[in-house]
Image (spheres, rainbow, N blue to C red):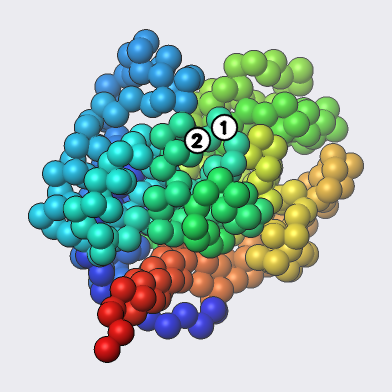
Amino acid sequence: MTNVQPSSKLTVLYVGLNDPGQTCLHRMQAMESLGHRVTAISTSPGDVAPSGVARARHRLRLPADPVNVNAQICASVPSEKPDVLWLDKGNTIRPKTLAFVKRHSPRTLVVGYSPDDMYQPHNTSIYFVKGLPLYDLFFTTKSYGVTELQSMGCRRVQFIDNAFDPSAHRPIELSQVDRERLGGAVGFIGHYERERAQSIDALAQAGISVRVWGPAWEQFKPSHPLLRIEHHSVWGDEYVKAICAFEINLGFLRKSNRDLSTTRSIEIPACGAFMLAERTAEHQRLFEEGREAEFFADDSELLEKAKFYLAHPHERADIARRGRERCLAGGYSNQGRMRQMMAAVSELRDALAVESTPAS
């Protein structure tokens, strides 16, 4: 486990999509578990469907603010003067809001986090890009994102690995009914992408049963009866049960995000489940190949390893067990990652305080 010095306890105004099952909520809860005093402002509109105007604004990269998050920040900061304004993928936060924070609470650090590739326009907003120079520190789960976000004007950017939530992502004992309802031989949970569909179809054509949970698969028409597409996502314990119900969990990476690893890369092994994922340097750093997870480079290797591990359940179970052990011992939890991030925030806060102290 990485040796990280404990951070001082900070007051945090935490802004993000805090719906149940969201990784944003998991991060906020990890922050609270470390003893920081957290006040939440949720960007979630609840069950209200986006209007036509809201969808148009999203396409223009000028997202609406349906719950008046910007106004809530401006109302809270002058009186509360938090140590940290934490923005979890703050696409709806206006630059003028950040300027207001700087003006009315100069000692409040503006800290950002995103699990997405924020160099890609489809993941960002015009507000986010224009506001980047006002962030004091930004955490990205994309290793290549450090220099890219700096080139966009962010002063300090730090890479942080993906994480799992111990209370959510854990082995679950399943009934036979749940196994049949959610699982199967080989499974994938995630959005449609053409490359993923082609690889999954190749497995089915080779005689391997595959089941998919996730959105946007309507554009893909299965050509084999062994391929089963469930056209919706699974969340919370249903998501974890589905992972535990598959003999092999596929770990495809999102090409449009240039992924080298994802939250799923950590969550699957953390559930004590077997992961067969695309081979990248990040995956190989996180898990020992053939011992804690398995990887593939192309459809031929994917098929070869899928057939092998379906036929060797004991080897598959050993790898799954060691993968979970790596997650626990390696500090891969949200608490472990958040401890690293808050230590960096505290260090920056102390350094800036020294800089602002007049020389005697």
Q: Amino acid at mark 1?
A: Pro
Residue occupying image coordinates x 38% and y 26%: 63
Q: Position of residue 260 (x, y in %)?
A: 68, 51
Q: Which residue is mark 1?
A: 121
Q: Position of residue 339 (x, y in %)?
A: 41, 71
Return the residue found at the far front.
360
Asked whether the residues under the numbered discs 2 and 1 touch, taking CB atoms below 8 Å apart as contact, a structural biologist would say yes
Q: Is residue 113 left or right of residue 41?
A: right
Residue occupying image coordinates x 68% and y 43%: 258
188 vs 352, nearest the viewer: 352
Q: The residue tagged with tag 2: helix, strand or loop? A: loop
Q: Which residue is mark 2?
A: 124
Q: Quadrant of the C terminus?
A: bottom left
- Between the C-alphas of marks 2 and 1, the distance is 5 Å
Q: The residue tagged with tag 1: helix, strand or loop? A: helix
Residue 204 falls in image quadrant: top right
- Tell me, for residue 21, which label it has, or none: none
223 vs 48, nearest the viewer: 48
Q: Is residue 210 visible?
A: no
Q: Position of residue 106 (x, y in %)?
A: 25, 60
Q: How many marks?
A: 2
Q: Amino acid at mark 2?
A: Thr
